[in-house]
Amino acid sequence: MKAFIDDHRVVYGVEPICKVLPIAPSTYYLHAARQANPELRSTRAKQDEALSQQIRRVWEESFQNYGARKVWIQLQREGLAVARCTVERLMRSLGLKGVMRGKTIKTTISDANAACPLDRVNRQFSAERPNALWVADFTYVKTWQGFVYVAFVIDVFARYIVGWKVSSSAHTDFVLDALEQALHDRQPARDGSLIHHSDRGVQYVSIRYSERLAEAGVEASVGSVGDSYDNALAETINGLYKAERIHKQSWKNREAVELATLTWVDWFNHRRLLGPIGNIPPAEAEARYYQQLTESAKAA
């Protein structure tokens, strides 16, 4: 409304326009004065401007993924006392929204005749410590040069991504590479205390993959045919990856997807707030576990 008055005040004058429009001349002049001198703005307006900058920063740092709830939680973690409704109001005014999850696409190709390990998880995707239960799955990404495939291995305790691999083919080698990264980084005990769970995809029930798990002393577990619930946690991570990183743009080639995945995994592990583990990042959840373990040992 002020812009309309500004555009026509030279011809008609401010007061005549205000008589037609539902606005008092004093309101117009006050708004104009505040625009000319920001120090004249109300305390709330000044606070909103400062808070809006923090909100936009948190939203940008989340790769534009966080909605109002996650932005509010992150601000609280940083020591900024602000009401959630205020964050919601300012995000609406700024036009900022959180990412929305899409539909899950089935990628599992199973072999009904292949021998499979038992299901040792039974849809109970929880663990009392790191390196107790890993889940594995892969998804695909469309690029200008064709499809590429992305495999993840996730530690269930804190949803920490312990291994990943991007490949131009979906053969066993590429899921094996993700497993090798996880084994190298985590160095799990070879006593069968770690369970590795997957669906019945041919890559995961292949002889080579099964032999590598046995060699590493990892207990294999496989869900039922074509049932995403039996590998629900891995499916959830795939969904977050697609929604938060992949579906936001088109991808030129495998190298571009690989770099984007590297960036996303680092953010996911070290900075993304996850509700199921208390709205903290996976790395922080694991650090807390080991700190408590150390303190308990000292106390004993």
Image (cartoon, grey):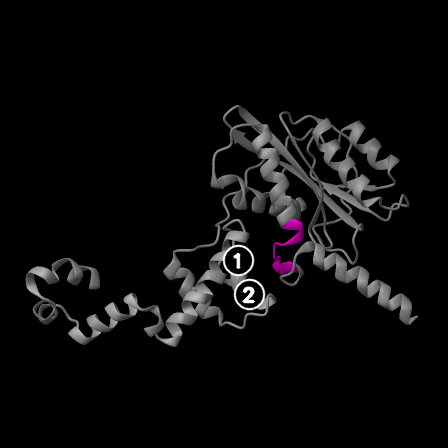
Amino acid type shown at disc 1: Val
Mark 2 and 1 residues: CB-CB less than 8 Å, in contact?
yes
Span of residues in magenta: 268-276
Image point (43%, 71%), residue name = 47
In the picture provided, is 210 more to the left or to the right than 2?
A: right
Visible residue check, residue 204: no
Image point (12%, 59%), residue name = 8
Image point (47%, 38%), residue name = 249
Image coordinates for residue 293, horizontal then vertical, percent: 84, 63
Amino acid type shown at disc 2: Leu
As drawn, 71 above or below 140: below
**The disc label shown at residue 86, or none:** none
Q: Which residue is mark 1?
A: 58
Visible residue check, residue 246: yes
Q: Which residue is mark 2?
A: 75
What is the total number of numbered labels drawn onto the structure image?
A: 2
Quadrant where the N terminus sits is bottom left
Dot 1: element = helix
Task: Report, in whole angstroms, how far the alpha carbon at label 2 lies from the one at label 1.
Answer: 8 Å
- Of residues 255 and 217, the one drawn nearer to the viewer in this rendering: 255
In the picture provided, is 170 more to the left or to the right than 249?
A: right
Quadrant where the C terminus sits is bottom right
Q: State which quadrant residue 50 falls in.
A: bottom left
At label 1, counting other C-alpha atoms closer than 10 Å, the crowd grade (few under 14, some 14-19, many 20 or more) is some
Among numbered discs 2 and 1, the one appearing first in the sequence: 1
- Of residues 45 and 277, the one drawn nearer to the viewer in this rendering: 45
